[in-house]
Each structure stands twice: as structure tokens, then as C-alpha cells.
Amino acid sequence: MGNIFPDRETVKAFAGEHGFSGIECSFDLAAIPRSPGEQSAWVRGVMAFRPFEVRFHCPFYQVDLGHDNPDEARAADSLFRHIIGLVTKAGGRYLTIHVGLGHNSTENLSWERTIRNLQRLVQYATERQVVVCLENLAWGWTSRPHLFEKLVRKSGAGVTFDIGHAYACESVVSRQYAIEDFVAPHAHRVFNAHVYHTEIEGLGHVPPRGPDDLKSRLSILKEINCPWWVIEIREPEALVHTKRIIDAFLEEQGEKASDGKKFVSS
């Protein structure tokens, strides 16, 4: 599981009790380990999650590689490179980042700088055996499948497919695009999925009411063989409720969570 509880022991115990097989650790922008001592303590904390596999997530608001202000862009690049270093020390392989998270306009972002700096960051991470994955959001460039495809293709990034954001974005609501258009051009590069029903402003991530809320999107994940499914819900009861729906879906498909799919909470 992720960081829905404040202490690692509770997280690990909950993950084991409810049949999760991995943990997605989201970094807190206000508590990034900096000093050697802090970094060593953080790595030990990640190692304590073993035998669960751990992947990493940077849900940073208004931290953008393509900021129109060069100083802001450099600061974002420096932060992400520092985090890649932490992930490497912890033996991590996957890191999810965003473009435009927390912005209500793209006016402060440069398309060209975003692609250029994202490509450089992807290369930097690749040299350290870390896959940087770009997540689709409910608003902005990454909420439009044709622009999301360009960002992924031109940067060489992997993909974290957020099925709740895809459901809520205007491109899909208006029927200009279908949900599968976010992954069809690069299905082989989808290494992670964030699973919940939808995102509503003021409410956050909303869990599914029942199987019909998720079935068609889970079918997409199964078809593209996405190996890592994160139930991105922080409320324990809603989290377990959603996992039961996913488990039932897989049982209908003749699979079990332990047959290859990894379910985690964030």
C-alpha cells in the first residue's frame, strides 16, 4: 500500500491482511529526504516494506519541468533528479510524475521545454535503471490523448494510466476520444495503472459503486497486459470495497490477483 496510514508498520500489516502484493510510495514535497542521514533513514524505511514490491509516485503540485520560467523549470529538474537518486538507492525501478498538476492554465508552461526536459530526465533515469512514467491527468495537455501520445513518444517516457482521470476528462466526456485512446498508441509502455471510478473536484477520488463502474476499464488494462494496478483510494473501507470488485472481475476472467497482477493502494 501507499501512505494512507502515517506509520509503515500499519501500512505493511494492512497490505498483508487484505491481499495486496505491492506498495506505491508517494513522496511528500514538504518532506523530501535531503541530508545523508535523512536519505539513509528513508531507504531503510522503504526496505522495511519487503517482501512487497515498491514503486514510487511524485504527486507534486505546480512543479513542472516545462515551466515557462527557466528558474522554475531548473528547480523542478533538480528535484526530480534528486528523487531518481533516492529511488535508485532504494532499489526502485519505476517513478510516476506529472505535467501540469495543480495548474489551472497552460499559460505558464512551455510545450517545447516540457518535451525537451522530460526527454532528458527520462534518459537520466534510464542510465540509473529507473523508468520514468508520465501520468494522464483530468485536465491539461495530458488529458488529451493526442497530446499525451506526443509527450510519451517524443520523450521516451513510460505510462501510468489513470483510469479515473481518463473517465473524468473533457476529451472523453465530450466523446471526442475514447478512454482506450490514452493507451492504444503505446500499450507496450503502460507499466502502471491508477484505479478508482472518477475524480470530482472537492471530493477527490471516488470509489466505484459496483462492478459496472470499472468493468470496461479493467478490461482495457487486462487487454494491454498492464502488470501493476494501484487502487488509488485513501479511505480504508472504500479501498477494500474497490479491491473486492477487482478481485471479482478477475475471478470472472479466470484469474487471481496473485496470477501476475499486482494490486496496491496509494
Image (cartoon, rainbow, N blue to C red):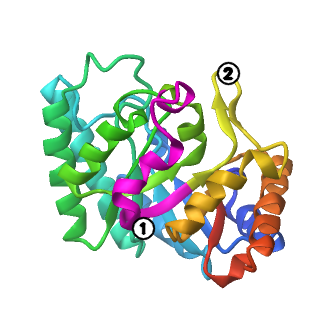
Q: How far is the residue under mark 2 from the one under mark 1?
A: 37 Å
Q: Name the foreground residue: 4 vs 189.
A: 189
On screen, 264 above or below 180?
below
Answer whether residue 63 is magenta in the image.
no
Give the percent coordinates (x, y) of residue 199: 64, 33
| Residue 226 as seen in the image, left or right of residue 158 | right
Asked whether residue 231 appears in the rendered view, the answer is: no
For mark 1, give the secondary structure.
helix
Within 10 Å of disc 2 (Cα), the crowding (few <14, some 14-19, many 20+) is few
Tell me which segment is drawn in magenta: 171-193
**Which residue is disc 1 drawn over?**
40
Please report whichever mark, 2 or 1, sits nearer to the chain's N-terminal start. Answer: 1
Give the percent coordinates (x, y) of residue 219: 63, 61
**Which residue is disc 2 drawn over?**
202
On screen, 121 above or below 86?
above
Q: Name the foreground residue: 211 vs 142.
A: 211
